[in-house]
């Protein structure tokens, strides 16, 4: 009798523990899967972008308008604005080899310019193109190197 | 020419106010001509080769005409030049709004630096430039074209 009640208690405890952990676990898994999905689709988060920046293994491309780039941008980034892509691209093409890893960014996650420029780059033969979805705002808030 | 309803005091106030405004605006554009050139490029109207020259011309026009308005030197002429500039600015902005382009207007950058006013092209800067046009008209029509340090002949 007492053995059965002990089993019941253990089972109930297990249920309580699992139910309390599972929401946080599911959130953890959800965040992880979103990050994974973003990376798979060519989007980078802040830490991945910073790692590429530190190892100098990518070319940073600013998709915002040139006059905004002129005021401030990620250190070492090149301007290739979405609005004047056709005018700027020939010069860009001469400077950057087609196999270079490109990290495109714009102002913030909601800004679509980075994705648009990334698409245009891929259309023009650049295969290794990633988008830093956080944009300059996230980069600046983290206190990472800027110039302009 | 009869000066219908426009007292010289009103013309003077308009002259000083607009003159000061254009002096500041032209001066700050000349200080950072590269930025102004890049904003003009964003309008996608002029060929790239002409842009630096046009940026210099517009900035100098604003500064010189502003100074001339302020000191009342050839006020009618300088306000007429500014009227032409206003028409160009208004036309360029309307063109870009109709093409669905969105960017800074490049009109009065000091307003955004000093007061945090965003200068995106749209209805507000267009209406503001139309207002400037209306304010410049009385000077162009009823202002003087005299040289202030020369005595007027009787």
Image (cartoon, rainbow, N blue to C red):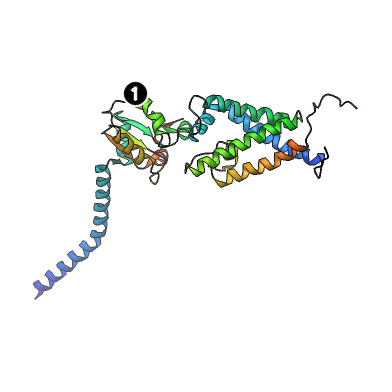
* Residue B99 pos. (x, y %): 47, 42
The residue sitting at 55% across, 40% down in the picture is B93
Q: Residue furthest bottom?
A: A1
* Residue B62 pos. (x, y %): 64, 30
Pointer 1 residue: A94
The residue sitting at 72% across, 29% down in the picture is B68
- Report if residue B119 is visible in the image: no
Q: Chain of mark 1?
A: A
Q: Residue furthest front?
A: B1
Q: Nearer the viewer, residue A105 or B54?
A: B54
Residue A19's place in the image compared with B59, above or below, is below
Q: Quadrant of residue B122?
A: top right
Residue A10's place in the image compared with B1, above or below, is below
Q: Quadrant of residue B28?
A: top right
Q: Nearer the viewer, residue A88 or A23?
A: A88
Q: Quadrant of residue A119?
A: top left
Quadrant location, the N terminus of chain A = bottom left
* Residue A64 pos. (x, y %): 42, 37
Q: Secondary structure at mark 1?
A: helix
**Across the whole image, how many numbered discs are drawn on residues?**
1
């Amino acid at each position: 009798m007492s053995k059965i009640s002990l089993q019941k208690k253990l089972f109930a405890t297990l249920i309580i523990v699992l139910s309390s952990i599972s929401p946080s676990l599911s959130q953890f898994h959800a965040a992880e899967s979103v990050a994974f999905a973003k990376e798979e689709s060519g989007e980078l988060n802040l830490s991945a972008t910073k790692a590429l920046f530190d190892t100098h293994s990518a070319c940073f491309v600013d998709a915002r308008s040139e006059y905004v780039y002129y005021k401030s941008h990620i250190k070492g980034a090149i301007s290739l604005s979405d609005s004047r892509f056709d005018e700027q691209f020939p010069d860009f093409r001469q400077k950057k080899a087609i196999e270079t890893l490109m990290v495109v960014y714009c102002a913030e996650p909601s800004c679509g310019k980075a994705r648009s420029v990334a698409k245009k780059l891929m259309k023009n033969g650049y295969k290794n193109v990633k988008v830093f979805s956080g944009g300059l705002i996230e980069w600046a808030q983290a206190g990472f190197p800027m110039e302009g | 020419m009869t000066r219908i309803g426009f007292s010289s005091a009103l013309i003077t106030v308009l002259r000083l106010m607009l003159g000061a405004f254009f002096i500041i605006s032209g001066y700050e554009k000349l200080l950072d001509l590269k930025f102004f050139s890049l904003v003009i490029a964003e309008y996608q109207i002029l060929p790239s080769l002409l842009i630096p020259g046009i940026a210099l011309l517009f900035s100098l026009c604003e500064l010189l005409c502003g100074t001339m308005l302020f000191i009342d030197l050839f006020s009618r002429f300088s306000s007429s030049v500014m009227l032409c500039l206003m028409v160009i600015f208004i036309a360029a902005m309307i063109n870009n709004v109709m093409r669905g382009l969105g960017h800074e207007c490049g009109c009065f950058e000091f307003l955004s630096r000093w007061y945090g006013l965003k200068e995106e092209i749209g209805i507000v800067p267009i209406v503001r430039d139309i207002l400037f046009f209306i304010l410049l008209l009385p000077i162009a029509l009823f202002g003087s074209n005299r040289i202030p340090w020369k005595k007027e002949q009787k």
